[in-house]
Amino acid sequence: MMKDIAKVLFTEETIAARVKELGSQINKDYEGKELIVVGVLKGALMFMADLIREIKTPLRFDLIAVSSYGASTSSSGIVRIIKDIDMSIENEHVLVIEDIVDTGLTLKYLMKTLASRQPASLKSCVLLDKPSRRKTEITPDYSGFSIPDWFVVGYGLDFAQRYRQLPVIAVLKPEAYNIGNSQEKEES
Ligand code: IMP
């Protein structure tokens, strides 16, 4: 696992410090309110688990899973909800937690879908942002780190469903990426 890593971008300590900062900002912004946190499976799992422990605002959380279709996804923007949240978000303050914004199509679709359910407010918090890859206009309300156009793994992020358990965020060696990709890519 660690032998496949070419470069560590963010260590456990760096991630934890940034998650703490994001938590403080969220605590300030939502003071006196209650939150519903919607985590996007599977990639946001670690980030969400760590972030909500920094949030002092009372909250409930739910999980949503989306999938996107193969290579055409990034251009077509076809996103499908494969597991919806169970709770109503009408008149609630909702914070969507996502692992990474790349083209932005997934987050845009999710925000649009959730906005149609009439929440009191709707914001997004992403761990990583690749602004240079954007295909649609969307800026996350909270963002952990901006990164260049590199494919990264670890701390929930996968390549072909692997490497999610790495405690760091890293770039793999080129040879580690040379395994087959599936038709339908499970999101996040
Ligand atoms: P978007 O719709 O292009 O913004 O894609 C967002 C999704 O693509 C994320 O939720 C991830 O699942 C996946 N993704 C994009 N870049 C990376 C990466 O560098 N590593 C792992 N997954 C990524």
Image: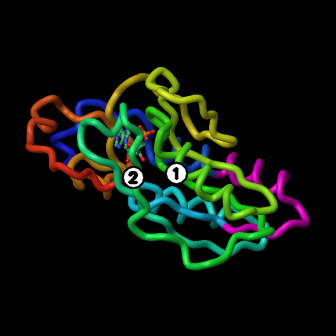
Ligand 1 within 8 A of label 1's CB?
yes
Q: Position of residue 119 (x, y in %)?
A: 75, 63
27 on left or right of 134: right
Instruction: Place residue 114 in its image quadrant.
Output: bottom right
* Residue farthest bottom in this picture: 86
Query: Which residue is pictured at 64% across the width and 49% down the height?
Result: 124
Q: Residue 84: horizontal and vertical position, in percent?
A: 49, 70
- How is this picture coloured? rainbow
Amino acid at circle 1: Glu
In the image, residue 31 lies in the stretch drawn in magenta: yes
Q: Is mark 2 within 8 Å of ligand 1?
A: yes
Quadrant location of ligand 1? top left
Residue identifier under label 1: 98
Mark 2 secondary-structure assignment: loop
User: Residue drawn at (45%, 62%), measured in percent from left and top?
Assistant: 45
Count neighbours of disc 1 (C-alpha within 10 A) and say few if under 14, some if 14 to 19, many if 20 or more: many
- Judging depth in this view, the residue of 163 and 130 nearest the camera is 130
Q: Is residue 165 left or right of residue 5?
A: right
Are the residues at dot 1 and dot 2 in contact (C-beta closer than 8 Å)? yes
Please say if 186 is above or below 181.
below
Q: Which residue is depicted at the point 75% across and 67% down? A: 35
Q: Earlier in the sequence, mark 1 or mark 2?
A: 1
| Number of numbered callouts drawn | 2
Residue 188, label in figure: 2
- Please state the extent of the stretch shown in magenta in the rendering: 20-36
- In which image quadrant can residue 175 be found? top left
**SS at mark 1?**
strand
Q: Residue at 67% across / 76% down in the picture?
A: 88
